[in-house]
Image (spheres, grey):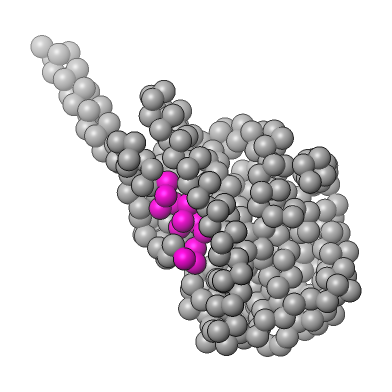
């Protein structure tokens, strides 16, 4: 009788666990704006596709389940199914992912997709799986990243010298060094305070970011440098994904494909619109001359061999990019 009772308790616990885990939680990384946020476009369409397929999925507001590092921990432990995350989070486990941030390597997000599909993304996911994480999709955040700052118009690399830039990670620190300037790592939640107090003078991001996050009171200049396709990640719990039935996994894969297709179409449509919105918000937009752009390209490419990513790993991305150009 005692064994039977224990068995019933265990079965009840498993049943409760299965019920509690039935909801697929998608942690957002931006305000829910389908016009300005590419990651929300992906996340929302992923959520809706799951619902249409009969799965219980729910969006959770930005940082309501924790900031970037906390969400990564939850994903790796199987407590959170999907997190819209920065590349740095996966880079903590496998720096190989930083290859998508090599400046002036890729023409656009479609080119990133082709290079990643040569086997590099599969290789990264094999390494991430050891820590309970997998990349469901590369997500286009918005137009290619440019240079925002609070102080002055940036027309040449030389204009950067007096600025201290906010850095997302060590990869951006290395990039700033090639430009003859400095960077300081600041979490995104602390960026407004850093910009207003002079801890940082600017940041790299796609054109919509100051508008989306309310930075237009202090960001006054934008140089459309088009450094890298602005990419973030849809990270998923590997245990959750592998624990799905074959049928449910197919539904998730289908939702990933649908959301990614919509995200890619969205960026093509919104790119020109966003640049106009930046100007309307009172931010001076500067386009680089061919000569100025050439100098940015030449200096920036130094990080292909001397940056935060090992030269041997960077070489794999460069080769994949060249093959799929």
Q: Is residue 141 magenta?
A: no
What residue occupies the far left of the structure in this picture?
1
* Residue at screen point 78% across, 54% down: 105
Q: Nearer the viewer, residue 109 or 312?
A: 109
- Please state which of residues 262 and 71 is positioned toward the viewer in this rendering: 262
Is 74 left, or right, of 113 in this rendering?
left
The residue drawn where x is 60% and y is 35% is 125
Residue at the image position 32 percent from the left and 40 percent from the top:
52
Above or below: residue 107 compared with residue 259: below
The picture places residue 283, in percent across and down from the top left corner, at 61, 84
Q: What span is colored magenta in the figure?
A: 35-46
Q: Is residue 17 above or below residue 32?
A: above
Q: Is residue 80 visible?
A: no
**Image side of residue 112 versus residue 3, left or right:** right
Query: Would you say 180 lies left or right of 148 here?
Result: right
Relative to the observer, which residue lies in front, 298 or 92? 298
Q: Which residue is nearer to you in this view: 173 or 122?
A: 122
Residue at image position (61%, 74%) is: 275
Q: Is residue 44 within the magenta segment?
A: yes
């Amino acid at each position: 009788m005692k064994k039977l009772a224990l068995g019933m308790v265990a079965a009840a616990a498993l049943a409760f666990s299965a019920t509690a885990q039935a909801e697929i939680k998608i942690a957002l990384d931006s305000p829910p704006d389908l016009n300005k946020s590419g990651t929300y476009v992906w996340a929302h369409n992923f959520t809706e596709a799951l619902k249409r397929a009969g799965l219980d999925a729910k969006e959770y507001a930005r940082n309501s389940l924790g900031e970037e590092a906390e969400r990564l921990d939850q994903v790796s432990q199987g407590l959170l199914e999907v997190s819209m995350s920065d590349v740095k989070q996966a880079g903590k486990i496998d720096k190989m992912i930083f290859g998508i941030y090599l400046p002036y390597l890729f023409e656009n997000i479609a080119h990133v997709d082709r290079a990643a599909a040569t086997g590099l993304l599969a290789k990264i996911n094999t390494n991430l799986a050891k820590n309970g994480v997998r990349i469901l999709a590369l997500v286009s955040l918005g137009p290619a990243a440019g240079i925002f700052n609070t102080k002055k118009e940036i027309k040449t690399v030389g204009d950067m010298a007096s600025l201290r830039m906010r850095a997302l990670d060590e990869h951006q620190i290395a990039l700033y060094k090639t430009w003859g300037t400095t960077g300081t790592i600041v979490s995104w939640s602390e960026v407004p305070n850093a910009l207003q107090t002079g801890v940082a003078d600017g940041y790299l991001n796609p054109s919509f970011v100051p508008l989306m996050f309310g930075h237009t009171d202090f960001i006054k200049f934008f140089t459309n440098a088009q450094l890298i396709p602005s990419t973030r990640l849809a990270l998923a719990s590997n245990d959750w994904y592998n624990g799905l039935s074959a049928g449910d996994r197919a539904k998730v894969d289908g939702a990933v494909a649908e959301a990614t297709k919509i995200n890619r179409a969205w960026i093509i449509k919104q790119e020109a619109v966003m640049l106009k919105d930046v100007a309307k918000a009172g931010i001076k937009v500067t386009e680089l001359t061919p000569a100025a752009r050439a100098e940015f390209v030449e200096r920036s490419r130094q990080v292909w061999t001397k940056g935060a990513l090992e030269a041997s790993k960077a070489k794999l991305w460069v080769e994949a990019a060249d093959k799929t150009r």
